[in-house]
Image: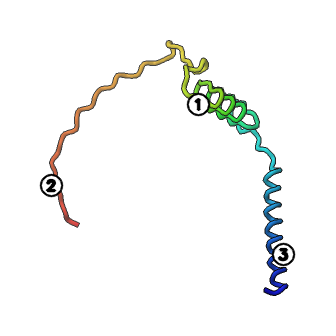
């Protein structure tokens, strides 16, 4: 190899290394993402919440749930310390008084379908 080719290869390697260092520096100083929340939910910088839920310390919560310390909760449940919970008892706001519930109309069963015999056709 000639001296010119060695220098060109050295400059190319140096340029590539500089690019990698710059990219790595940008990644290290990237701003943290804001908390993700919707509805009346509450979430800290590391959590995601929706509905009327509360999520703290790297957790995810939805509905009327509460999640803390890396947990996931939904519905009316509570999840703490890296656990998962869903469902739960009816939420107090979701309970409907018995007097307000309208009974469903009676359903008349349908007659069974009649069996038929068909002759297959192969006309195309």
Q: Nearer the viewer, residue 53 or 97?
A: 53
Residue under label 2: 119
Disc number at residue 84?
1
* Nearer mark to the viewer, of 1 and 2: 1
- Tell me which corner region of the image, top left, top right, bottom left or bottom right, holds residue 46: top right
Quarter of the image that includes the C terminus: bottom left
CA–CA distance between discs 1 and 3?
A: 54 Å
Q: Is residue 90 left or right of residue 13?
A: left
Name the element at disc 1. Answer: strand
Task: Name the residue at 79% across, 44% down.
Answer: 32
- Tell me which corner region of the image, top left, top right, bottom left or bottom right, holds residue 88: top right
Task: Name the residue at 62% across, 24% down.
Answer: 78
In percent of width and height, residue 111 lies at 23, 32
Question: Is residue 55 something one can see in this rendering?
Answer: yes
Task: Name the residue at 64% across, 31% down.
Answer: 82
Question: Number of labelled discs?
Answer: 3
If you read the primary sequence from the N terminus, does the residue marked by circle 2 or circle 3 appear first?
Answer: 3
Name the element at disc 2. Answer: loop
């Amino acid at each position: 190899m000639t001296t010119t080719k060695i220098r060109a290869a050295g400059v190319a390697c140096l340029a590539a290394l500089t690019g990698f260092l710059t990219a790595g520096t940008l990644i290290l100083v990237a701003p943290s993402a804001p908390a993700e929340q919707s509805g009346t939910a509450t979430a800290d910088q590391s959590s995601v919440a929706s509905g009327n839920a509360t999520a703290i310390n790297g957790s995810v919560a939805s509905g009327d749930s509460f999640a803390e310390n890396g947990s996931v909760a939904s519905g009316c449940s509570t999840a703490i310390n890296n656990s998962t919970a869903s469902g739960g008892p009816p939420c107090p706001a979701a309970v409907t008084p018995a007097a307000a519930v309208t009974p469903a109309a009676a359903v008349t069963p349908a007659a069974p379908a009649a069996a038929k015999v068909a002759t297959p056709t192969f006309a195309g």
